Image (cartoon, rainbow, N blue to C red):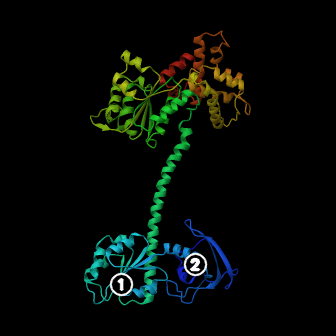
Amino acid sequence: MSGLDPMAHAYTANLSEGGIYLKTREAPPELPIGTHLTVVFRLPRGGPELSLAGTIVWTAAHVRDHLGRHAVGMGLRFEAGQDEEREHIRRFVRSFRYQVVLLDFPEPELARRSLGDVYEIVSVTDEAALWETAAAGRVGLILAGVEQDARTKPARLARILGANVEQLPPIVYAAPEPELDLTIAIEHSDRVVFRRAPLEPLELRTLGCRLVDAHVLAYENDRLTGELEAAIDRLRRENRYLRQRVAEPSRLEGMLGESEAMRQVFELIERVAPLNTSVLIEGETGTGKDLAARAVHALSTRAEKPFLVQNCAALPETLLDGELFGHVRGAFTGATSDRAGLFEAAHGGTVFLDEVGEMTPSMQAKLLRVLAAGEVRRVGSTKLTIVDVRVVCATHRDLDAMVKAGTFRQDLFYRLRTFVIPLPPLRERRADIAAMALHFLDIYAERHKHPVPGFTPDAIAVLESHGWPGNVRELEHSIERMLILAPSGKKIDAPLVRDTVGIAASANGASKDRGLDEALMDYERQLITAELERSGGVLAKAARTLGVDRTTLSKRCKRLGLRAGG
């Protein structure tokens, strides 16, 4: 017996006589009537474990269900000497039993006879006692009424109905005739039922049980709805937290490393991400400045808002102006409609400006206005728009030197340097090269469906000895090329690494017959070739990845004798 159902009416019928009855239509064959047995069970909510000895019996003849019919059931009749266990059960069941409160009810004995075996009958003498009893949360019904010779009693119920009646359970008002001051209140309340006195016992029992059942159902529905809403809210918060935790490897993907230099970078990102201050990311080309910017956004409170990127070196000033700030119809040839810029489109989120050092002085002034006041003005418009964006900038140039040379605004420089994240070049974190190489190898092996189990120790040594002037970007593209050239199912060896990186051998003295310029051109040719292959020959896409504009890359391709697409 795992527990008791306190809402089953026949359960509590004869507790005072030492019995608990389970409603059933027939006795289970393994428990025939008259069987002597011991039931061991533990009361819920941390209650004690009880051991009850007794005899299986039918319910007493006078026990009736809530419709007034004889309750067909069976149960355990306690043996003598188990008063303590019986009291435990009585208190437990009592804690679940709903109360019927009598307020000026003309027939209290009728209420006890009709409902006392199902509910606890409680009498109150005034409104304060009623509200105090109702506050306990176990009141399922109020029986109110008036004697024929007590004409002043309805005023009490009228005051109750005029108060916050929604906090009370259903009310049955019994009287020979409804009083005038109650008629309107009763007509406008779905919680008050009028019945002419005197009441019949079966009528009161049926009506009372029906109203309590409806009240309990509505109460439980409200309670469960509240718990469900609280659970959904908790799950949303937990889901958001888990999404952040699960997504952490991907949002920091490419920023792998256990070196001291990278641990400092991760610490700076985690420190500044929850704030709304602007961030300047400094580092050589290919060190992962865009990944650092994405990590700042992903770890911030703006993570679910847009993250928009613009390479300031990829567009001339006129196009960059419209791209960042938008334009209105007719602002220039081809402006056939209004268009929002990146700052407006990223409202609530983050704008990442790569190569901010390439901005012209006029664009620097407009960016300073956004950082200082959150104001943008579309090209061709006089209207200012307030935006809420976080600006993250990146550059490989020495802005301090540019300020001294007069090519970068000093006030913007100080504004951007509120919080700086310096990214170390790959040659200063050689301890991370092996892990990063394996990481990129796994990615491209899955992408190209070309399984390669890893690198030989000599190959790792060559990777770690290379200077990697192109930093992480060069390493990633070199690993992809090695994967393509490597035999399926075999590890990448040192000769393949040397052949792939090309310049590594000359840079480390393995091939000294080539001059520096030739070696650099060889490396540049290889890097651009790999990126063009990766981008399907699309020059503009390769230029964005390499961090240069399309015209610059086109000129370099011609100088190196490379053929490129559009």
x and y percentages locating residue 527 in the rendered image = 58, 23
Numbered badge on residue 105? 1
Instruction: Tell which of 220 and 537 is nearer to you.
Output: 220
**Amino acid beneath label 2:** Asp
Mark-to-mark CA distance, 2 and 1 = 34 Å
Q: Which of label 2 and label 1 is nearer to you?
A: 2
x and y percentages locating residue 410 in the rendered image = 35, 21
Instruction: Tell which of 489 and 188 is nearer to you.
Output: 188
For the residue carrying disc 1, how many other residues have a C-alpha within 10 Å: few (<14), some (14-19), or many (20+)? Answer: many
Rendered view: 408 above or below 79: above
Q: Can the viewer see residue 377? A: no
Which residue is drawn at the image coordinates 57% and 82% (left, top)?
18
Under circle 1, the secondary element is loop
x and y percentages locating residue 174 in the rendered image = 35, 85
Q: Quick check: 301 left or right of 85? A: left
x and y percentages locating residue 157 in the rendered image = 30, 78
Rendered view: 96 above or below 236: below
Instruction: Tell which of 225 and 71 is nearer to you.
Output: 71
- The tag earlier along the polypeptide, 2 or 1, is 2
Which residue is drawn at the image coordinates 46% and 83% (left, top)?
116
Q: Badge 2 is on which residue? A: 83
Which residue is drawn at the image coordinates 63% and 31% (left, top)?
435
